[in-house]
Image: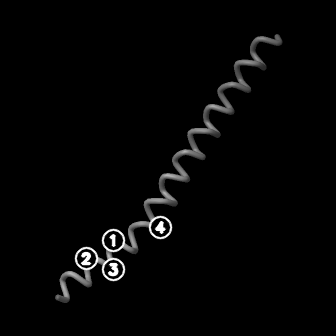
Amino acid sequence: MFELIKSLGFALLMVPVVMVGLGALIWGLGEVFNLISKGDRHGKQH
């Protein structure tokens, strides 16, 4: 019974961690693509 509670608690702890991790990954990729697109536009102007 204790193992079940322990695994359930671990799963509940992992949910917000995974959510934050995915959010940070998506945000990070968005920032990288934003910088790349800015660099492309800046390069075309010159």
Q: Which residue is mark 1?
A: 11
Which numbered tag is attached to residue 9?
3
User: Residue 34, percent across and down?
Assistant: 68, 33
Which numbered tag is attached to residue 31?
none
Q: Is residue 15 above or below residue 41?
A: below
Q: CA distance from mark 2 to mark 1?
A: 6 Å
Q: Which amino acid lies under the numbered mark 1 shown in the image of this protein?
A: Ala
User: Residue 45, percent across and down?
Assistant: 82, 12
Q: Which amino acid lies under the numbered mark 3 shown in the image of this protein?
A: Gly
Q: Which residue is mark 4?
A: 16
Q: CA distance from mark 2 to mark 4?
A: 15 Å
- Density class for disc 2 (Cα within 10 Å; few <14, some 14-19, many ≥20) is few
The residue at 58%/44% (across/down) is: 28
User: Residue 4, percent across and down?
Assistant: 21, 81
Q: Viewed as shown, does residue 33 lie left or right of 39?
A: left
- Density class for disc 1 (Cα within 10 Å; few <14, some 14-19, many ≥20) is few
Task: Check contact, mark 3 vs mark 2: CB within 8 A.
Answer: yes
Q: Viewed as shown, does residue 27 lie left or right of 45?
A: left
The residue at 33%/71% (across/down) is: 11
Q: Which amino acid lies under the numbered mark 2 shown in the image of this protein?
A: Ser
Q: Is residue 19 above or below residue 13?
A: above
Task: Check contact, mark 3 vs mark 1: CB within 8 A.
Answer: yes
Q: Secondary structure at mark 3?
A: helix
Q: Viewed as shown, does residue 21 lie left or right of 31?
A: left
Q: Earlier in the sequence, mark 4 or mark 1?
A: 1
Q: Secondary structure at mark 4?
A: helix
Q: CA distance from mark 4 to mark 1?
A: 10 Å
Q: Which residue is mark 2?
A: 7
Q: Viewed as shown, does residue 28 lie left or right of 14?
A: right
Task: Check contact, mark 2 vs mark 1: CB within 8 A.
Answer: yes
Quadrant of the image for the N terminus? bottom left
The image quadrant that residue 30 belongs to is top right
